[in-house]
Amino acid sequence: MPGEFFQTVRRLTRASNIDPGRIVFELTERDTVQNLALLKSFALHLRREGFRLAIDDFGSGFSSFSYLKRLPVDIIKIEGEFVADMLADSRSMAIVRSVAALASDFGIRTVAEFVESAEVLDAARTLGIDLLQGYHIGRPAPDLRVV
């Protein structure tokens, strides 16, 4: 089955003339990974094909750091609950700050989820977070917009 998936994705990207480096596959960190060896093989194959890998909701589970050690991760999407609460809760701020610093040390880009106000946006930028998403940035839309 993974072979079929890779063949299909490769065919679609070539037929559409899309650079695989512009496509990011997300692994939701809340999902339980039953076979880390299989996931690592899958992720390495994605990387060899030029695709990128992101971990969504980073920090929501207990295995977050294990993923960073074992998988070729390009992007970490910081759990939105921590981002949304970071101005009112010092522990959330410490987690966001620590994840941003760790990602920077590993050469991994960061995305702050749940950026719902100008104050949270400013704080995330101050912490060096690379990309931001949330209603303050823009609402979900049916059309693809490049910003």
Image (spheres, rainbow, N blue to C red):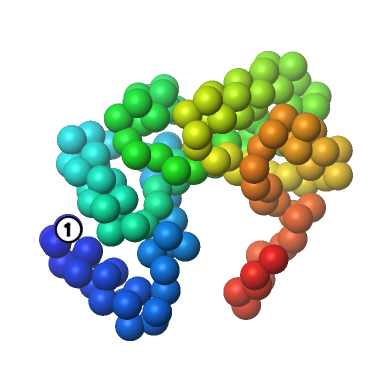
Q: Could one spot residue 85 in this view of the protein?
A: no
Classify residue 92 by image quadrant: top right
Q: Amino acid at mark 1?
A: Pro
Q: Could one spot residue 33 in this view of the protein?
A: yes
Q: Is residue 3 left or right of residue 66?
A: left
Q: Residues within 10 Å of mark 1 (few under 14, many from 20)?
A: few
User: Secondary structure under badge 1?
Assistant: helix
Identity of the residue furthest to the bottom in this view: 15
Q: Residue at x 30, y 30 (%)?
A: 70
Quadrant of the snapshot with the C terminus: bottom right
Percent position of residue 44, x then y? 25, 45
Residue closer to the observer: 27 or 9: 9
Identity of the residue furthest to the right in this view: 118
Percent position of residue 114, x then y? 68, 44
Relative height, residue 45 to residue 40 (above, below): below
Q: Residue at x 16, y 67 (%)?
A: 4
Q: Is residue 106 left or right of residue 51?
A: right
Residue closer to the observer: 18 or 124: 18
Quadrant of the snapshot with the N terminus: bottom left
Q: Residue at x 66, y 23 (%)?
A: 97
Classify residue 21 by image quadrant: bottom left
Percent position of residue 77, x then y? 54, 41
Q: Residue at x 77, y 46 (%)?
A: 116
Kindly identify which residue carries mark 1. 2
Relative height, residue 7 to residue 106 (above, below): below
Relative height, residue 31 to residue 13 (above, below): above
Residue closer to the observer: 54 or 19: 19
Percent position of residue 142, x then y? 62, 75
How many marks overall? 1
Q: Is residue 144 left or right of residue 32?
A: right
